[in-house]
Image (cartoon, rainbow, N blue to C red):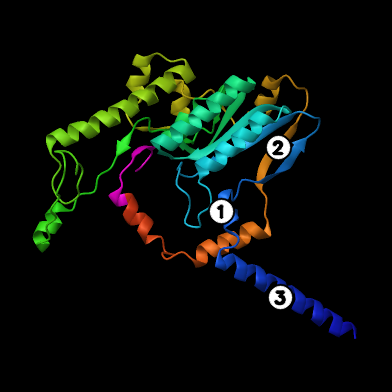
Amino acid sequence: MHRKKWVALLLVLVVFFAGLLVELVSGSYDELADNPGFSWDENVVSGSGTGKIVQLFVSGVISGEQNSTGMPSMSQLLTEQLRRVEEDANVKALVLRIDSPGGEVVATDELHARISRLKQVRHIPIVVSMGSTAASGGYYLATTGDAIFANPNTLTGSLGVIFNLVNYSEAANRLGVRQFAIKSGRFKDIGSPARPLTDPERQIFQTLVNESYSKFVDVIVRGRNLSRQRVLEIADGRVYSGEQAKRLGLIDQFGDLEDATRYALSLSGESEALIVRYTDQLSLSKLLFSMKQYWSNPDPLGLSRILERESSPKLLYQFMP
């Protein structure tokens, strides 16, 4: 009899979850797409008291694009986490752990603006801890810090902008492939991979790069209190080690995440505080949403994204060896 009860319970659970999956696939759970992934638990790493030191992590390429499952981009997630920090009066300092080669100019600049807004609204100290790589756009974000910690072997620098264009015109000519562009203006097909880049087109792209580069120089000048001339001398795109960056005034101290967190606590005015991280709140609905996105993905290998990147060039604050 006892066994029959367990079998019956199991059948009920199977039917329940099967119903959820059917409804999910049929689209009745589309409301999950409105705000997926924007919920976190506060994970207390250590410490005590009512005040909080929040550790936020900038990991990987900075992008405003959603991933292949349709979940929010890294930029969106960090923006919402920064909003949570801003709205929590108990947060007394922020530690940004950056392990990133940089990424898209727009996404990087938007995050920089969001962090700067946090400083203006809350007036809390921000300390940056660099991981193995904090280059280009990663360093762009680091300039918001009141202090920057790094390892002597951290790869940083790569201060500049890159704009890549793929061109297959010679290969197309050899294969007898031709593309005809019926356009409304002289530059409407600027950067077309099917023909060589003209000098006027190159100058247009160079102007865009120069504008973004000038903005990069500006944030370093303001964030690091260096002269513009000095920044122009060192911002030639090369990468620096942590040792070199310290000599150049690009970072302040050597140390790891714990060292940066202790320093943030000393700046916060608190004698003790909770060290907090935001961890993703796992839920059945989120899991099912991800499964739905995967099942309905017509390109599970991500080939379309590779082709899209090649055909849709972007201005990048990114270290690209």
Marked residue nearer the N-terminal end (1 or 2): 1
179 magenta-colored: no
Q: Is residue 72 left or right of residue 20?
A: left
Q: Residue at x 65, y 59 (%)?
A: 285
Mark 1 residue type: Ala
Q: Which residue is mark 3?
A: 14
> Residue 151: percent from the left, percent from the top?
53, 33
Viewer-side residue, 27 vs 89: 27
Q: Which residue is mark 2?
A: 276
- Direction right: furthest residue: 1
Per the model, the C-alpha gap separating discs 3 and 1 is 25 Å
Q: Nearer the viewer, mark 1 or mark 2?
A: 1
Secondary structure beneath dot 2 equals strand
Q: Is residue 67 left or right of residue 290?
A: left
> Residue 90: percent from the left, percent from the top?
74, 28
Q: Residue at x 11, y 63 (%)?
A: 175
The magenta stretch is 310-321
Q: Is residue 257 visible?
A: no
Marked residue nearer the N-terminal end (2 or 3): 3
Mark 2 residue type: Val
Q: Which residue is mark 1?
A: 33
Q: Nearer the viewer, mark 2 or mark 3?
A: 3
Per the model, the C-alpha gap separating discs 2 and 3 is 38 Å
